[in-house]
Amino acid sequence: MHFFKKISDLQAYLNYQRSQNLSIGFAPTMGALHQGHMSLIEHTNKHSNISVSSIFINPTQFNDPTDLEKYPRTLEEDINLLYDHQLNTLFTPPVEEIYPAQGIHTPDFNFGRLDQVLEGVFRQDHFKGVAQVVHRLLEIVRPDDLFMGQKDYQQWTIIYHMLQQMESEVRLHMVPTVREADGLAMSSRNRRLTAEWRAKAPYIFRLLSEAQENYTLRPIAEICDQAISTLKEMGFRTEYFNMVDGYNLENVTSPEDHKKVVACVAAWAGEIRLIDNVILKEDHTFSF
Ligand code: AMP
């Protein structure tokens, strides 16, 4: 595995690979890696000649300083996992490489309401930070293919629109969510759950699965309200449990009128904020 901290060294290596006509696939992460991230690496390895991943905890996407401070940092374990999964190139830049003192230019992207709904209601400027860092990393790595998880469905959608606005040729791939055996979506934050909350956390996926079974049979509002009540009874603090259009992320009332429908949830399990989603209705006419 090739390991770089400096942009100039990474670029010298990747420029050489590009000159050999090798394709570059990129999977950015914030570390504290788990099998969900490894699935991204496996997809990247399979699809591209040179798989590149980054570990960078991006300060500009954290709206809560405590969340940033407590974000798990497990670099040594991460490196071992990536090595075991045959990653070709790891980039772990310090903050000054990504955000140099002289500043960086990020285009003024317009996401319409995409960054105002769901997460956008509860995490002010979060997606501005995400777009900023992904734009910066793309400028540095210049991949042919970019791999991101369905787990962060809204993030994926926003990056898709960012690439379109940039008229970028980078192909964006969606990697399905990897779950624990009990259904809990894998997340770096899961390791901060108490034993009590870890036991309750799979309920989130159970309710999403129930929504999948029922969304054509019962009124959407009723299913969502019931899910929120069940989570409340269990002690979760739910921020949203919505069924949305898979493209514009607006709430749906009649799923039959939409090509793609996704159920999305964010709920606090004690001190830990969990998000998850399930694609209820897939649009098989759309391909990347
Ligand atoms: P993060 O390190 O949380 O910023 O995530 C880095 C990438 O891994 C993002 O594209 C996430 O959507 C993706 N990811 C995180 N958790 C999972 C999961 N359980 N399954 C698949 N992809 C995931």
Image: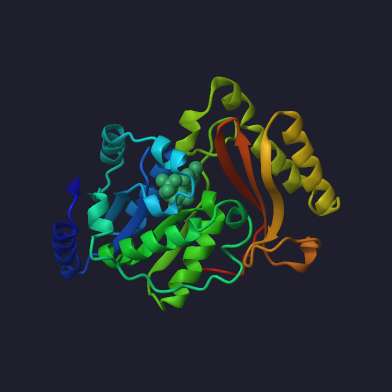
**Image coordinates for residue 49, horizontal then vertical, percent:** 27, 59
> Which residue is pictured at 20% across the width and 67% down the height?
18
The front one of 197 and 71 is: 71
**Image coordinates for residue 260, horizontal then vertical, percent:** 67, 63
> Which residue is pictured at 44% across the width and 43% down the height?
65
**Image coordinates for residue 25, horizontal then vertical, percent:** 32, 59
Q: Is residue 251 left or right of residue 114?
A: right
Q: Is residue 16 left or right of residue 89?
A: left
The quarter in which the N terminus is drawn is top left
Can the viewer see residue 288 in this picture? no
The front one of 47 and 18 is: 18
> Relative to 68, does residue 157 appear above or below in the rendering?
below
The front one of 48 and 262 is: 262
Q: Which image quadrant for residue 208?
A: top right
Q: Is residue 208 left or right of residue 178?
A: right
Q: Is residue 59 left or right of residue 229?
A: left
Q: Which image quadrant for residue 35?
A: top left
> Which residue is pictured at 54% across the width and 70% down the height?
111
